[in-house]
Image: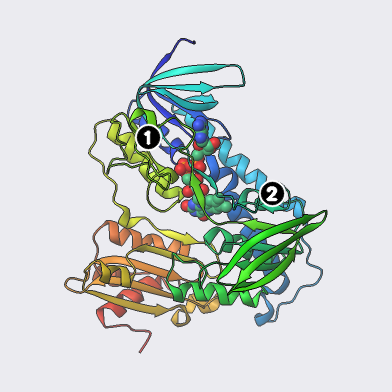
Amino acid sequence: GDFAEEVDTLIIGSGPGGYVAAIRAAQLGQKVTIVEKGDIGGVCLNVGCIPSKALIQAGHKFHEAKSGGDDMGITAEKVNVDFSKVQEWKAGIVNKLTGGVQGLLKANNVNIVQGEAYFSDENSVKVSTDEYNSQTYKFKNCIVATGSRPVELPNFKYSSRVINSTGALQLDDIPEKLVVIGGGYIGVELAGAYANLGAEVTVLEGEKRILGGFEKQMAQLVQRRLKKKGVKFETQAFAQSVEESDNGVNIKAEVKGKEKSFDADYVLVSVGRKPNTDELGLEQIGVEIGDNGLIKTDKQCRTGNKSIYAIGDIIEGPQLAHKASYEGKIAAEAISGESSEIDYLGIPMVVFAEPELASVGYTESEAKEAGYDVVGAKFPFQANGRALSLNDSEGFMKLVTRKEDGLVIGAQIAGPNASDMIAEAGLAIEAGMTAEDLAMTIHAHPTLGEITMETAEVALGTPVHIA
Ligand code: FAD
């Protein structure tokens, strides 16, 4: 065996959970080692949030350039997309960010170890650096942040034509035809991006509607807009099998009880993500894992083993980068003896579709279910001058406030820039603000931000710009 190296805090995984935890732990004076078997930055920076938003933006640019100005009398001819340039540009962004994270880790004196970690006992982790070599690290505390991977459907083995989100982000050409299995946010975002880039897209969704995590009315806006772009939707559709040929795939699916067949260049399977908790040796050291593969943790992200913490996609809650980072800070602070605890209410959820969808805190029906007596106030983007001048005025904001005192406990936004606008509602929740606080905050005119102010005024019963 090798000689164990002693470290204070060992972190496994360098995604938005792990790298943020590493930096915060170092800031608090811990000696930190981070182990990564793949690329620094994890799924989010390399094959998730960042490259997907870059691809979506490329789609927008292309679509806007071609026909975005039609209503205003602006037309363009010969608009082209050089997809290899798009991919190069996207890779440049990823490289800049992952390089930045490496720099930050080094600046904080975090020791970076490249290799795959496995728990050899309660206080040590063995890291295989290559086929023949390994190094053991003995830790005082460990934060597990190993993230998740795409689920594979039994009859859809991944190949060059049966792809997951990673493959979909790395295509060499824009497909002529793309079938997407799964209408969750990842499937919907990528469907939108490729539809904008000119692909003929079909989405197969098992449920009665897409985007199950969002209110029906919000999901409908997205579905309607995608349909206008030519995206086809098959709901209550269950993909059964796929046949590959040299230049494409044929998918058989049961749609509302009837067999249907779909031809495409690629089939993107996006039916959920599975936590990477099965190959770490966790069970033998007192870390409890549920049937869903998720690690059980307390409010400080501590597992059943008191010196081991778990954060991000491998624990309960939405699989989102900012949730992983938030938990990373809490775990690092807990190790330093601070009393920080998780409070999930303020974690926003965003879908980068058209229109963008965003939600934070309770929806009206969730609040009622939780026993709150609430006011659900709604304001349309149509009544906002900035939205009209952007030529993008489809959507609405909803604010959920407690009836007795006006406390803001939730908000939902569907509309342009919903992803940025939701931050103000999140702040209101975190800071314990009321509808009156939002309504009394002076917002610049003309901005989309005024929508938040006006929705709060609806909640108070005194809206100025709707009757
Ligand atoms: P990960 O980012 O998955 O990182 C885990 C790291 O651990 C990996 O680098 C892995 O190599 C490493 N690792 C695993 N096992 C070991 C081991 N045994 N030893 C060493 N290293 C190991 N979220 C958002 O909030 N907004 C978005 O817009 C968004 N878009 C997305 C788009 C796509 C296409 C996808 C796939 C995901 C998207 N997500 C988005 C989700 C987001 O990427 C994840 O929630 C986030 O990356 C989870 O962070 P994490 O730190 O838990 O794990």
Q: Amino acid at mark 1?
A: Arg
Residue 34, percent from left and from top: 46, 28
- Mark 2 / mark 1, whichever is N-terminal: 1
Which residue lies at the image location 77% right of the left edge and 64% below the top edge? 176
Alpha carbons under labels 2 and 1: distance apart: 32 Å
Locate residue 174 relative to residue 92 in the image: left or right: right
Residue 56, percent from left and from top: 62, 59
Q: Amino acid at mark 2?
A: Gln
Q: Nearer the viewer, residue 250 or 435?
A: 250
Q: Residues within 10 Å of mark 1 (few under 14, many from 20)?
A: many
User: For the residue with label 1, is its CB less than 8 Å from the closest atom of ligand 1?
Assistant: no
Splitting the image into 4 quarters, where does residue 108 fall?
A: top left
Q: Is residue 207 visible?
A: yes
Which residue lies at the image location 28% right of the left edge and 35% below the top edge? 334
Locate residue 5 relative to residue 365 in the image: left or right: right
Locate residue 271 relative to residue 434 in the image: left or right: right
Nearest-to-viewer mark from 2 and 1: 2
